[in-house]
Each structure stands twice: as C-alpha cells, then as structure tokens.
Image: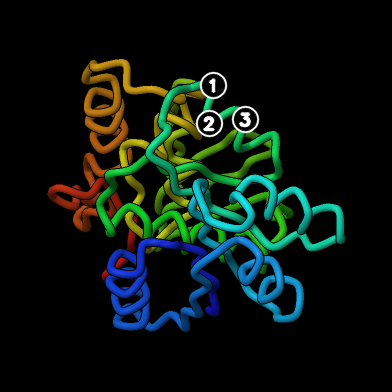
Amino acid sequence: MKILVIEDDLEAAAYMTKAFREAGIVADHASDGESGLFMGTENTYDVMVVDRMLPRRDGLSVISELRKRGIDTPVLILSALGQVDDRVTGLRAGGDDYLPKPYAFSELLARVEVLGRRKGKPEQDMAYRVGDLELDRLSHEVKRAGKEILLQPREFRLLEYLMKNAGQVVTRTMLLENVWDYHFDPQTNVIDVHVSRLRSKIEKDFDRPLLKTVRGAGYMIKDEG
C-alpha cells in the first residue's frame, strides 16, 4: 500500500511516516496544502491522510479540489476539531473517514488499512468466510461447520463488519460508527455486551475460537487453524 500524509507538524509527520513504513506501508509526506494537492494530483495513492489545519491551503480545501479533479482516493481526515458538526463538515467535503486528535497510531493504522481495502475491493461481496464460519449477506444466514447460527439484527451487522475486515484490528470507534451509526462515544458497554453475545453464539460447541479481543486496541476475527 502507498499513502500520502499531508501534515504540517514535522515531528508528528516524521513519527507517523516512520510508523507506517515499519508496518510495511510506503508513506510520502507533504508539509502544506498546496504541496499535498500537487502530490495527490500527480501521483497515485491508495489512501491519503490529511490534517485539517494546514498552511497555504487548508485540508478540506485540498480534499474538495481533489474531488473536483476526479480523484477518488480514500481520504482520512485528522483534526483537533472532533465535534459531530466538525466531522460532518469533513465528510461532506469529500473525506471518507475522520479521526480526532489525539489518537492512537494503532487506530490510525487500522483505519488506513480499511480504507485501502475499500479502494481495491468494491463492496460486491455477497458472502464472507472465515475458517468454517460463513455469512451470507443476501439470505442473512450464518453457519459454522454447516450448522446454522441465529443472530439478532445488530449481532448480524456486527459479525458482517468484523468478517469484512477479517484479520485486521477493528477499533471500538470503528464499530460505533459503522455498526451503530454513532459518531460519538455513548459511554456505555453496548459494544462489550454485543461482542460477548456474538462470541458465545459463534464459538459455543466449537473447538477453535475465531473472535479475539486485542487489548487496548479493539477486536479481530481471524482463523488461525
């Protein structure tokens, strides 16, 4: 994967690009909006990470101009402005995801990986499979080793999102936004409760666990058999 980081804080940018490269991602850097717009227009990237407050041209202006030029590269917006209205403004400007500062790099990395897969793999999959666990989006059937598993609608949506991102860490924020449609933290244990119920249903009576809790990061569904 190749990404462009548009960030004027040179120390933060150096840390970010170094961490991305250690994760096996090629990361270019632009330190202002005009440079970022030029690089994003002249080069091909899988994902762009754009700080909202930039010199010479602000991040939202960069994104809007890229979209006007027909460049549909997924964009993750970074910003100290984290209120719901700020996020809505960023998404309406053409952003695909929005991560408020301060943030954990593990979450930034997970979100970038998800956006990268979104570009390369259109949402055309009607079924997902992880090991012997199968989910059919059309029939809303879930089976493991051929045995049907009955899920509530929210449990199905949760499993669908996890399986869509199989092998990758899915953070609590990602689940709140993509499964519950919350763009704020409701300060409840709703995720823990549903993950616990889902884990019980898809792992009870089966020898091999699939749904893992990644301490301090989120959850992952993966077959290690």
Q: Is residue 63 left or right of residue 104?
A: right
Q: Residue at x 38, y 39 (%)?
A: 80
Residue for point 37% across, 56% down: 108
Disc 2: which residue: 87
Q: Check whether the beta carbons of the residues at disc 1 and disc 2 lie within 8 A of each other.
A: yes
Assess disc 3: are there few (<14), some (14-19) or many (≥20) residues with their C-alpha within 10 Å of its C-alpha. few
Residue that mark 1 sits on: 85
Residue sitting nearer the eye, 12 or 17: 12
Residue 220, given in percent of the width and then of the height, sits at: 31, 53
Q: Is residue 48 left or right of residue 215?
A: right
Pointer 2: residues within 10 angstroms few (<14), some, or many (20+)?
Answer: many
- Which quadrant holds the C terminus? bottom left
Residue 205: horizontal and vertical position, in percent? 22, 43
From the viewer's side, name the closer residue of 102 and 162: 102
> What amino acid type is highlighted by mark number 3?
Thr
Give the residue at x 23% y 34%: 200
Q: Which of 180/82 is in front? A: 82
Q: Give the SS element for disc 3.
A: helix
Is 211 on the left-hand or right-hand side of 144?
left
In the displayed structure, 180 sits above or below 99; it is above
Mark 1 residue type = Asp
C-alpha separation, residue under disc 1 versus residue under disc 2: 5 Å
Q: Does the CB distance between marks 1 and 3 fall below 8 Å?
A: yes
Asked if residue 1 is positioned above or below residue 49 in the image, the reply reads below
Neighbour tally class for label 1: few under 14, some 14-19, many 20 plus, Cα within 10 Å: few
How far separated are the C-alphas under marks 2 and 3?
A: 5 Å
Mark 2 and mark 3 in contact? Answer it, CB < 8 Å: yes
Q: CA distance from mark 1 to mark 3?
A: 6 Å
Q: Which mark is drawn over residue 89?
A: 3
